[in-house]
């Protein structure tokens, strides 16, 4: 019996059936995907249209995330609103500024992709329920919520960096817990806030408490070694700022209208560059502040017993203002600040001479508004960089500057009365 080659089918009937079945399934899957894509797109467009028609919302779409803004009168809480947003996709920013009837943030908890929630000027807002435990929120701004009294839902926000509750005028307590990433805390104009504990926030960099008229104590301030900005201006119930000497990174400090019985804690802050103060009865000279070797700006206003610039840190170069100080008769000592660019002694009505100004070769602006005893402006004539001198209400007469030969021929003498 001989042997020969025998052709066999390339594919068996069973293999062909399997391939056909696979092809059919694949085509069906593709069709399903296409249908789902079109359905999703249609549903998304329907959701956007409902957001616009029902809530007067604005939707700005990006490639991966989007922004939603809403100030519609129909917005009372965020339950239906958030459900519609979820049909659109994953928003990064939700801005509800000006929503007149918004009462609660209930429903926000489902929008886990949101990084920034902005709620400004919503006068009926009484509850921030819905924010607790939010995983991705890095910024929460709830400003001018005049009826808000309870901030207990502000807990477990592991990613929150910035919290702004400014203008919550009815808020009496602000117990903040489990905010490990918090760096910026704004409680400006929370007029009824009685006390504050910041000991849980060692990473805090900015703390604004201006206008908190009833605030009597700040616990844990000494532990904020990362704090760069502290504003307690017009926190008139504070007696001193306990723990301030521990703020080794502090750059800007505003203590206007806060009673400071002892300036020793402030006078040695190693990083301080800007100091704003005013209304302190105890400050008479700048000697308590002579240790501020990095200070660039000093703003001192309406200190009734301030009488001398003695002790001013020579590092002051950008701005020195000593305004409305009724006992200041001389600026002797200012010559130590050779690099000073701006000097303002507005409203110092007993100031008589500005001779020391002649040594400030870097001076660009000088204000002598309402310095009624100053009548000689000749100390400025050799200052090449000086561009403007404001003299409204001073003792300098306009005709006395007409023939002055100044180092800077373009210098402006402004006699308009201002503050």
Image (cartoon, rainbow, N blue to C red):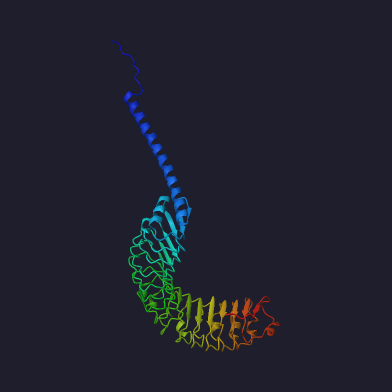
As drawn, the residue found furthest toward the left would be 1
Q: Quadrant of the C terminus?
A: bottom right
Residue drawn where x is 54% and y is 75% of the image: 318
Q: Position of residue 363 (x, y in %)?
A: 59, 78
Foreground pick, 407 / 279: 279
**Residue 35 appears anywhere in the view:** yes
**Residue 113 appears anywhere in the view:** no
As drawn, the residue found furthest toward the right would be 403
As drawn, the residue found furthest toward the top would be 1
Residue drawn where x is 60% and y is 86% of the image: 355
Foreground pick, 236 / 96: 96
Q: Position of residue 35 (x, y in %)?
A: 41, 40
Q: Quadrant of residue 111?
A: bottom left
Q: Is residue 19 left or right of residue 68?
A: left
Q: Is residue 48 left or right of residue 378?
A: left
Q: Quadrant of residue 78?
A: bottom left
Q: Position of residue 4 (x, y in %)?
A: 33, 14
Q: Is residue 150 above or below residue 404?
A: above
Q: Quadrant of the N terminus?
A: top left
């Amino acid at each position: 019996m001989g042997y020969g080659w025998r052709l066999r089918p390339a594919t068996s009937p069973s293999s062909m059936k399997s391939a056909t079945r696979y092809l059919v399934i694949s085509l069906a899957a593709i069709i399903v995907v296409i249908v789902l894509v079109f359905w999703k797109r249609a549903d998304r467009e329907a959701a956007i249209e409902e957001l616009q028609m029902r809530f007067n919302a604005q939707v700005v779409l990006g490639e991966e995330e989007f922004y939603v803004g809403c100030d519609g009168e129909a917005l009372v809480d965020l339950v239906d609103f958030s459900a519609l947003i979820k049909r659109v996709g994953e928003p990064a920013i939700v801005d509800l500024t000006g929503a007149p009837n918004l009462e609660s943030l209930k429903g926000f908890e489902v929008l886990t992709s949101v990084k920034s929630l902005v709620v400004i000027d919503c006068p009926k807002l009484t509850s921030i329920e819905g924010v607790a435990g939010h995983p991705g929120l890095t910024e929460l701004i709830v400003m001018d919520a005049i009826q808000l009294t309870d901030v207990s839902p502000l807990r477990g926000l592991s990613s929150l960096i910035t919290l702004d509750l400014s203008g919550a005028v009815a808020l009496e307590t602000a117990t903040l817990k489990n905010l490990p990433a918090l760096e910026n805390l704004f409680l400006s104009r929370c007029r009824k806030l009685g006390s504050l504990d910041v000991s849980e926030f060692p990473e805090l960099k900015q703390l604004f408490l201006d206008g908190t008229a009833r605030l009597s104590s700040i616990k844990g301030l000494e532990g904020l070694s990362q704090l760069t900005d502290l504003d307690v201006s017009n926190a008139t119930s504070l007696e001193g700022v306990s723990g301030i000497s521990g703020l080794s990174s502090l750059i800007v400090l505003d203590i206007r209208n806060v009673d400071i019985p002892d300036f020793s804690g402030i006078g040695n802050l190693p990083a301080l560059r800007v100091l704003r103060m005013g209304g302190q009865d105890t400050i008479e000279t700048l000697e308590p502040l002579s240790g501020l070797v990095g200070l660039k700006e000093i703003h001192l206003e309406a200190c009734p017993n301030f009488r001398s610039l003695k002790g001013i840190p020579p590092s002051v170069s950008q701005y020195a203002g000593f305004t409305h100080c009724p006992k200041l008769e001389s600026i002797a000592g200012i010559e130590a600040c050779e690099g000073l660019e701006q000097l303002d002694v507005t409203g110092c009505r007993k100031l008589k001479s500005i001779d020391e100004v002649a040594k400030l070769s870097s001076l660009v602006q000088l204000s002598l508004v309402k310095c009624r005893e100053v009548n000689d402006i000749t100390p400025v004539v050799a200052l090449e960089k000086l561009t403007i001198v404001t003299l409204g209400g001073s003792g300098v007469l306009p005709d006395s500057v007409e023939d002055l030969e100044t180092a800077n021929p373009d210098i402006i003498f402004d006699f308009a009365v201002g503050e």
